[in-house]
Amino acid sequence: MKASVSECSADLDLLHVELSTLSRAERRQVEKHKYFLSQTRGMDVGFEMAARDWFEKHSQEWREERHRRMLAMQRDEIAKYKWLRSEEARRDLGSAASLEWIRLYAAAWRDWFEKEYADVDELPGSRR
């Protein structure tokens, strides 16, 4: 079945949007994928072809794993903060300390995380 010109154009527009919003870590993943795909095919496949293949076959799993690890790291930070605040108060502050951390530090922590791990292929605790 042949794809229409408008379908191809829509696919290219979508790919262009995806490529323009890639994080540094995602771009590194596409570059790695390009290398291995080029090796397998015996020729340089180009960044766009590698990106399309990565988006179709690998991006969702990679993003989900990275997000899972980021959330686990964030939970660890919340647990440390909760423990420290509870020690200071000499009682278990429970979810109040967790909510306090979220209100005070969550946004800055996410910014730190994106800068700290922008060029890191594997996050601490990754399964790969």
Image (tube, grey):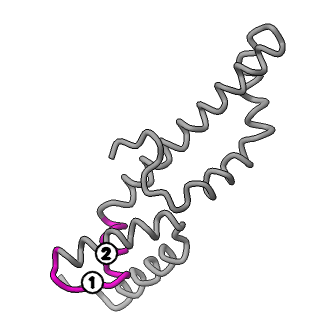
At mark 1, the secondary structure is: loop
In-front residue for pair 41/63:
41
Q: Residue furthest top?
A: 91
Q: Which mark is residue 34?
A: 2
Q: Residue at x 39, y 80 (%)?
A: 11
Q: Front-most of 33 and 18?
A: 33
Relative to 89, does residue 47 appear above or below in the rendering?
A: below
**Label whose residue precedes the other's in the sequence (2 or 1):** 2
Quadrant in the rendering for residue 87:
top right
Q: Does 107 appear above or below 74?
A: below
Query: Tag 2, which secondary structure?
Result: helix
Residue 86 in the image, given as x and y percentages of width and height: 76, 15
Query: Crowdedness of circle 2 by 10 Å Cα count: few (<14), some, many (20+)?
Result: many
Q: Is residue 60 magenta?
A: no
- The amino acid pointed to by label 2 is Lys
Q: Amino acid at mark 1?
A: Val
Write the residue at 23% across / 78% down: 38
Tell me the residue at 34%/91% (across/down).
5
Left or right position of 53 against 91: left
Q: Main secondary structure of the magenta part?
A: helix
CB atoms at circles 2 and 1 under 8 Å apart?
yes
Q: Is residue 84 left or right of residue 49?
A: right
Q: Which residues are magenta?
A: 40-56
The residue most toward the bottom is 5
Crowd class of label 1 (few under 14; some 14 to 19; many from 20; radius 10 Å) = some
Give the quarter of the image for residue 100: top right
In the rendering, at what x and y percent does residue 35 appear? 29, 74
Residue at label 1? 45
